[in-house]
Amino acid sequence: MITRSAHDVHNLADNLRQDTVNDSVLIAVGDSPSWQAQLAGAVTVPEQLLSMLQLSPDLLSGTLRANQEFSLRVPHAYIRRMALGDLNDPLLRQVLPVAQECQHVAGFGLDPLAEQSHNPVGGVIHKYRGRLLLIVGGACAVNCRFCFRRHFPYQDKQLDRDSWSEAMDYIRADTTIGEVILSGGDPLASSDRRLLKLATALNDIDHVRTLRIHTRLPVVIPGRVTDELLQWFAHQRLRPVMVIHANHANEIDDSVRQALAKLRQAGVTLLSQTVLLKGVNDDAQILAALSEALFNAGVLPYYLHLLDRVHGAAHFNVPEERARAIMAEMMAASPGYLVPKLVREIAGKPSKTRIY
Ligand code: SF4
C-alpha cells in the first residue's frame, strides 16, 4: 500500500500543477501568500514545528516512526493559533505524531468503516440511499492524527481522469441520488478550476439538487475562501452546503470568522462536524465554547462523532459512557441548537447511529 504521506505529496503536486496554468502559486494580491503557497509551505518536519513553538526537540522520542507511517503536515496559519511552550495545546495534539500511534490496539484497523467495500466505481463511495461521496483527491492541508482515512488507498479510489466519466455515469443512472458530497482528502485542496468542472458536470444531472462539501480548509487556511471560490458557489444551480470540520474553539479566530462570513454571504449553508478527542475536547465546557464560537461565526453545530476506530488513533478514544455524560452536561448548560448530535458511524449501517 502507498502510504498516505507519500500519496499526499503526489496529490499536492498534481493539484499545484493544475493550478499553475491560471493561478499564481507564490504570492496573491497584497503581500499575503496565496492559499496554494500556504498549502505547499506547510510544516512537515516535527523538529521545525517544536522549535517554532519553543518546545524542546527531546520531546520527539517516538515521533519519528509515527511520522514515517503518516507524516506531519500543518500550515503556518494553523500553527499561529497554538500556544507557545505547551505540548498539550489542543491544536498541537491534533497534528503532532506521537509514539502511541505505532501501537496495535485490538478493534482498531486500517479501514474502520469498510469504505473500500462500498466503492462501486473509481472515486465513488456509495453507502447511504439518496446520497453518495466523491473522493475528489487525497491531499489535505493538515494531516489530522485521528483521521479515519489515514490508511485509505487514494491512489486506487479517487476521482481521476480515468474514473471521471464512469463516476458521472453512475450518478446519472441512479435517480435516487439527490445529494453529492465532495470528500477526500480535502476537496478544497483541489483548484477552483477543477471544482468548477466537477460542479458543471453535476449541474447537468437533473436529479442532483444539493452539493455538500466536507472540508477543514476554511479553518486551517482561511485564505482558501477566495473570490473565485465564492463565484463558483454563486453561479450554480445546486444548493451549496458546507460542513466545516472544527474540534476546538481556539481554531476559530478572526481570519476564520471572516472566511465563513464570506461563504454565508455567497449563500452557502454552513454546518459543522467535530470528532470527540481525548485530551483535545473531551469536556462539556470545551465543547460548549466550540459550539458558541461556531454559532457566532454563522455555523450550526451539527455532528459530534465518536472516534472511528482507525489504527494509530486509539489514544484519542473517548468511551461511549463518558461521551454520553459529556452530552448530558452540555444539554443542561446550553440551548438545544448549540448541542450537536452525538453519532457513531458503524460499517454496514444505512445511516449514522445516533448515540445521544
Ligand atoms: S482534513 Fe479531514 S481528511 Fe484530511 S487528515 Fe484531517 S480529518 Fe483526515
Image (cartoon, rainbow, N blue to C red):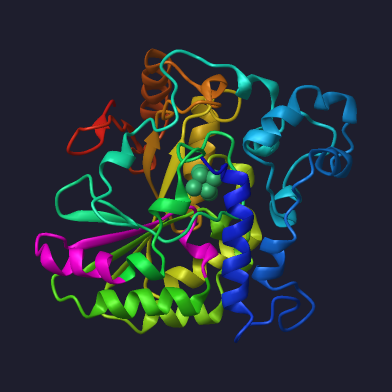
| Residue 235 left/right relative to 154 | left
Residue at 54%, 81% in the rendered image: 227
| Residue 296 left/right relative to 87 | left
Q: Is residue 115 magenta?
A: no
Quarter of the rendering containing residue 68 = top right
The reply to whether residue 217 is in sight is: yes
**Foreground pick, 222 / 66:** 66
| Residue 158 left/right relative to 6 | left
Q: Is residue 171 magenta?
A: yes
Depicted 195 relative to depicted 175: above or below:
below
Residue at 57%, 20% in the rendered image: 315
**Foreground pick, 93 / 2:** 2
Stretch of the chain drawn in magenta: 165-190
Residue 130 position, x and y percent, is 15, 54
Picture mark count: 0
Residue at 41%, 22% in the rendered image: 329
Residue 270 position, x and y percent, is 39, 59
**Foreground pick, 92 / 260:** 92
